[in-house]
Every structure is written in C-alpha cells, then in structure tokens.
Image: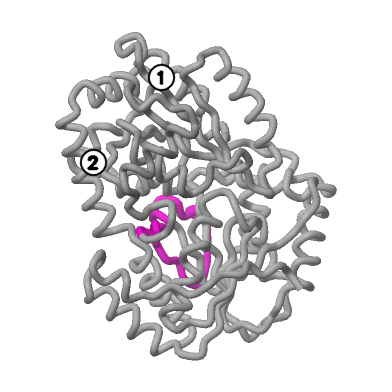
Amino acid sequence: MLQKVSLAVKDLDKYRLLVGSELIDEVEALAQSLKGIRVCHINSTPFGGGVAELLYSYIPLARGAGICADWQVIHGDHRFFTITKSLHNALQGKEYPQIETEAIQRIYKASNLQNAQELDPNYDVFVVNDPQPAALRHFCDAEQAKWIWRCHVDSSEPDEATWQFLRPYIEGYDAAIFTMERFVPADLKAPQIAIMAPAIDPLNTKNMDLPSTLWREMLDNLDIDKGRPLISQISRFDPWKDPFGVMQVYRLAKEKLPGLQLALITSFAGDDPEAWDMYAAVHQEADKDPDIYIFSNLTGVGNMEVNAFQTASSVVIQKSIKEGFGLVVAEALWKGTPVVAGNTGGIPLQMTGELQEYLITTIEECAAKLVYLLEHSDIAHELGQRGKEHIRQNFLMPRLLRDELSLIKSLVD
C-alpha cells in the first residue's frame, strides 16, 4: 500500500470567530449531506511545497467536519521525479521536447502503474494533485469512485507536447480543478471544470499569532539583528521564484538603506531533485554578503520560524515569474505584513485594491516599491491590515473546504 500521512482532527468550530458562523454552518451542512463518504487526496511528497502545506491542514479540518478523509503519497525513483519536475515546469510553459521520447513516457507510465497497483482503492472520491500522479486514474481499477484532478500551477500556456501527453489522462477524470479560469487549457474536455483558489490555515503553527517575545527570541537564535530592517522571501529555490532576482532587488534597495537585511527561506521536498543544485548556487551568491541569510527546513527552520520571519519582516517579497497561487503571499498578509510580489498567476487574486500597486514585473520596479514601503511605515502598516482582511474574507481554509465539498457533492449526488 502507498504511504498514508498520519494526521489528527481539527475542530471546525474554532474557526467561527475568524470566518463567521454562516460559512461554518454551510460546511457542516455539506459534510452532513456527505456523511459516510470516503475521500482520499494523493500527491507526490508529504512535506515541502504548497500541496503538502495545503493537505497538512485540509485533511484534519475535513475530518473535523465529519468527512472520512485520508492522504496517500506516491513514490518513485530519481528518474521519475526528474521527469515529473520537468512536467511541472512544462505545464508552466517551459519547453520539454524529451516528453515525446518513448523512454521518458515509459518511465512515467510504469511508475504511475506501480503506484496505482499499491493504492488503497477503498474510497468513494480520489483527489489527485498535479502532474506527478496524473495517470493514476488511467491505471487504477477503482471504477466505482469519482476522480478529481487538481492543478496547482499556471497551466495557461503549457508546453504543447507535454500537454498533449498529459491531456488524455486528465480527461479521464470526472472533474478538474484549476486556481483561475485562465489557467484552463483551451482544448481540455473534462466532464466538469471547477475554479477554486487555495487557502491557508490561520490556526496552524505557520499562521497563528505569535507573542512578540517569542518571535524576537527566534530571530535572536538565528542571529538576525532586530535593530535593522529585514525583508524576506519564503519559497522553494526554483527558477520560477527568482531567488537571484530577489538578491538583485535587495542590493538595489540597500543602496538607499544600508542597514537592510535579507532572509531567503526555502524548503526541500522529495519530488524536487533540482532543488539541491539551485540551493548550492543561491548559497554561493548569498555568501558574498553577510546580511543575506539562507535558511531551510533541513537546518531547523520550520513552520514556526517561517511565521516569525513573516511577522518580523518589514516587507515580504514574492518575486515569482510564474505562480499558481503563492500561499506565502496570503501567509504574509495574514500577519499584517505588506508584500511586494510578481504580477503573475494567482498572486493578483490576493493583492487587490491599493495592494495592486505593489505587483511588479522588473527588478528595478520591485526595489523602488520595496524602498518606498520601508521608508513609509505608516503606509506599509495600512496595506498590511487591508491585505489581512482580504485574506480573511477569501483565502482561509474553511472556504476551501466548502468549495471542495460542494464539488464532491455535485459528483456523487
């Protein structure tokens, strides 16, 4: 059997004060109408990256609502995950001509077949995340179940060869979920297409309120100077997140603000074999400046420490070139911290109104907006508070649970 991630149960009622009773009542009514249904989410890694982040909070909350929900993780060798990383990049537009070779297709299909044979089939609904396990539906015998494929990346302009390879597998699902309407490839013929933005959990260790004494102590332990301004970017070290561009932004801003510090915080995941080379390259560049700090989940910087950095930072950067949604934007805004971010993918969903002025496309623009906020703390504070309210209304976990349960109900009724 595939690995099942062991998780507890979360009390849905604890979210009432944050999102309002109307939404919680709606979730409870949906869950009651689906009583007894068994739902399984499937992805390619139990830690690192946005999908694992979502499921870590989503599954316990679904259980708290009364849904029998589990999380299974596929496995594969280095060759398989190298291929699927390329598929991930190709869905976002990077060319991947190797997908047309028989050897690459054979490795992908063989791994999905093996995982399908090891999948616990005793569920009524499967939710399969991203391209790594996309062929599971094709190879699995669980014909009585409903199958949903969830795309977490910007697939609006995918590499054509890659999309034509994946499309028949995805069209075998009962429904497909995308973050935005424009992410849906034009030629996709799925029985049902749903638009559903991700969300964050305001009560987990990454997003709960931290006493100032605690986050200050955490920064002390990591040798961060609290007397000088701090900016940070929290994301995988991935070309799409542009960590080298972030360091260029920092250097431009530091010309105006010599005391500036930059923290780059990443997480490693088992399905991302490119990360180590990228980490080494980023570290080599960061070593040129003692005020650039590199941290990761492998050096003891986990959810609580990320919370501390997002809370303590004067501004958070998310200089993405391509982005499915960008949970870290919602996380930072939830803490009342202003964000300067790439004008791409799902990020503009989170930065509306006056926050739109801090959506950028160039390094120079990013540095100018960053310096402005660092020099105008009153405006930065106001933007942070507006951002927090926008996230509260639209991007907290109970809303995502309602949306997904509504889709499941439409499939099983």
**Between disc 1 and disc 2, whose residue precedes?**
1
Compared to residue 374, the image places residue 308 above or below, namely below
Snapshot quadrant of residue 13: bottom left
Instruction: Based on the picture, tell me whether residue 187 belongs to the magenta stretch.
Output: yes
Q: Position of residue 199 (x, y in %)?
A: 39, 58
Instruction: Based on the picture, tell me whether residue 222 belongs to the magenta stretch.
Output: no
Q: Main secondary structure of the magenta part?
A: loop
Kindly identify the residue that appears in the image at 52 percent across and 64 percent down.
Answer: 189
Residue furthest to the top: 255
Residue 250's tag is 1
Q: Which amino acid, mark 2?
A: Gly
Kindly identify the residue that appears in the image at 61 percent across and 69 percent down.
Answer: 6
Snapshot quadrant of residue 401: bottom left
Q: Is residue 203 visible?
A: yes
Q: Position of residue 300 (x, y in %)?
A: 58, 42
> Which stretch is magenta?
179-202
